[in-house]
Amino acid sequence: MSTPAADPIPRSVSWRRGRVRILDQRALPHRVLHVECTTADDVCDAIARLVVRGAPALAVAGAYGVALAAHRSRSPAAVDAAARRLAAARPTAVNLARGVEQALRAYRRGGAAGALACAEALAEDDVARNRAIGAHGAGVVADGARVLTHCNAGALACVGYGTALGVIRAAAEQGRRVHVWVGETRPVLQGARLTAWELGRLGIEATLVADTVPASLMARGEIDVVVVGADRIAANGDVANKIGTYALAVLARQHGVPFYVAAPTATIDLATPDGDAIVIEERDPAEVLTVAGVPVAPREARARNPAFDVTPARLVTGVVTEVGIARPPYRRSLPSHVRRAPAPPGVTVAAHP
Amino acid sequence: MSTPAADPIPRSVSWRRGRVRILDQRALPHRVLHVECTTADDVCDAIARLVVRGAPALAVAGAYGVALAAHRSRSPAAVDAAARRLAAARPTAVNLARGVEQALRAYRRGGAAGALACAEALAEDDVARNRAIGAHGAGVVADGARVLTHCNAGALACVGYGTALGVIRAAAEQGRRVHVWVGETRPVLQGARLTAWELGRLGIEATLVADTVPASLMARGEIDVVVVGADRIAANGDVANKIGTYALAVLARQHGVPFYVAAPTATIDLATPDGDAIVIEERDPAEVLTVAGVPVAPREARARNPAFDVTPARLVTGVVTEVGIARPPYRRSLPSHVRRAPAPPGVTVAAHP
């Protein structure tokens, strides 16, 4: 899988000569490095350490991990065990477990070649779906719009193109002038390190701010729309996404700013009834107590580090998917092919806002 | 001025052998260092570079700066000019300009000795007023309370004891069990570096979180009360404080959590009608683009760095001052001796919440 010459952002994950090659997002924006994984456990480790992150990218990394296990071992039990470890490497994004499961089913049908074909198809599919998300969502970004995004829901969070940044990118490609406010997204600074880097590569005007700033930008009328990604969307439309998203949704509602979530339908988990049922990953407090390896708090200080929060559906203006923009009530606006779980009736999807 | 042996936190600013000695807050929490200022411009520089910060501390630092100028120069014009530079070193906190003005008036009446006596009196007065703020405010922190604070409104932001942390400290001294959630307060990390350090020294239980976390703590019912400081309070009760305060106030209101501001009456500026009239300092974008000197964004990235925001009076449950808790409407609850400017009628102050 090579990156099309036209794309200024390298693929986050790919298969190369029997290895899984992962762009090391920890080294960005200063260096473009790759980690070469030779075992499924290398992939697990890369996922746990945030070498690769972002719900759609995790789906593909998990699938490639299964393909790697299948290529390294003749024992179905070993492949099963590797798949279980991969699926559990991070708990919040539903996409990871789904990508692993799809590759495992393909392995059971078609062996190692089947698993790899599945992973490769998921990778291609990701880019196509993100372009469709962009096409459906571009309309929410008007000419001259000042868009706020949080964390990184760009090409790096996927295999390519991006979800929330895909929407912004599509608007820019349609010739609209766009300015993006980028929340830095402590503690891991995905906004500062990744989103600012992507927007720079794409030539889209952006300004970085601390996570404390968007509220006063909204109060001064300097934000027209918020677009973020998602790690899991429950059946009732509650959205788990990077910690800080919920606060932005409350503030957007208070200030009359539309709040959109952009995510492939694979992020919608109808088996999870609502946000209360979503497991929120607690990460190492060291991420809060240090920045870029430098300690910023007293040595004896304690910290809590939840990686995600839940935004209730009532605060979400719409979910931009590859099949259209779903709006509340989601049980009725979701297309029937999305309904994979014990679930409600169907469907109509708005083509545009 | 020596720190009483009982106080585990060194004084932020003091006069020592003809110099102004300032605790270097940039070096905390890792090292306790002092900067020795020999000229008023050294003091200006220390203020601009955040060696000393916090509205009440700035008042005293500014006054000592005038005393220093008066000791170094026999020319009243030079002292006047130094006072103007000191007052302008940071624009948002009204206390700085007031401290400078008081010392300058004392200089005109009593020369260098008068200016120094004024600065020393302001320093002693600060600690006494903060203890009174603590006494009035302790009641807002119930036994077992989980308190959120932001930035540093502790002893370090004053000469001693603290305003918001003074309230928390007084509750702890009264034997109440308290847990403090400390927002790290990007970009300068006063929460992580200073508040966590103070609370550690005081033996008060604290947990550090990224600024994105309090919203979900509130949603889960894990915050009982918010107590923050202030840099300027307008006549209508609008509060300028560290960037991020406004978002916390909106979130507190949404979740039914009381939101208190703790500040000496010197922070109330009746000459400023409302928050729109408060100048918000924009600081160097480098504070956002780097952390502890380490670049965290692409080299070509742009950033905005407003240091403060304005919280409208309607979101403030009460302002804890040294004369009691002022509650809306402030024009009626402010004591008459606070009314120093073209201002409204008086008064009654609630003794306790």
Image (cartoon, coloured by chain):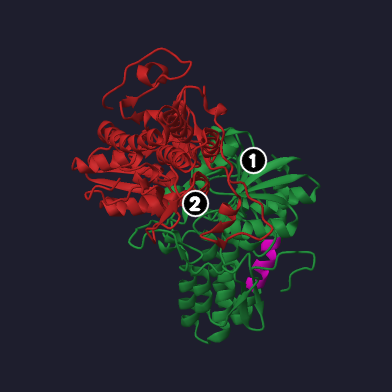
Chain colours: A red, B green
Span highlighted in magenta in the image: B118-127
Residue B197: numbered disc: none
- Is any part of residue A329 visible from this angle? no
Label 1 marks a residue whose chain is B
* Label 1 Cα crowd, 10 Å radius (few <14 / some 14-19 / many 20+): many
Q: Nearer the viewer, residue B160 or A306?
A: A306
Kind of residue at badge 1: Val
Q: Nearer the viewer, residue B104 or A120?
A: A120
Question: Could you tell me how far apart the alpha carbons at marks 1 and 2 are, in whole angstroms?
Answer: 28 Å
Q: Is residue A75 above or below residue B308?
A: above
Outermost residue to the top: A345
Q: Is residue B54 above or below residue A204?
A: below
Q: Is residue A102 above or below residue A295?
A: above
Q: Secondary structure at mark 2?
A: loop
- Residue B123 part of the magenta segment: yes
Outermost residue to the front: A74
Kind of residue at badge 2: Val
For image coordinates 54% across by 73% down, the residue present is B104
Q: Secondary structure at mark 1?
A: strand
**Residue at which label 1 appears:** B225
How far across and how far down the image is residue A353, in percent? Answer: 28, 27
Question: What kind of secondary structure does the magenta stretch mostly adopt?
Answer: helix
**Residue at which label 2 appears:** A188
Image quarter of residue B35: bottom right
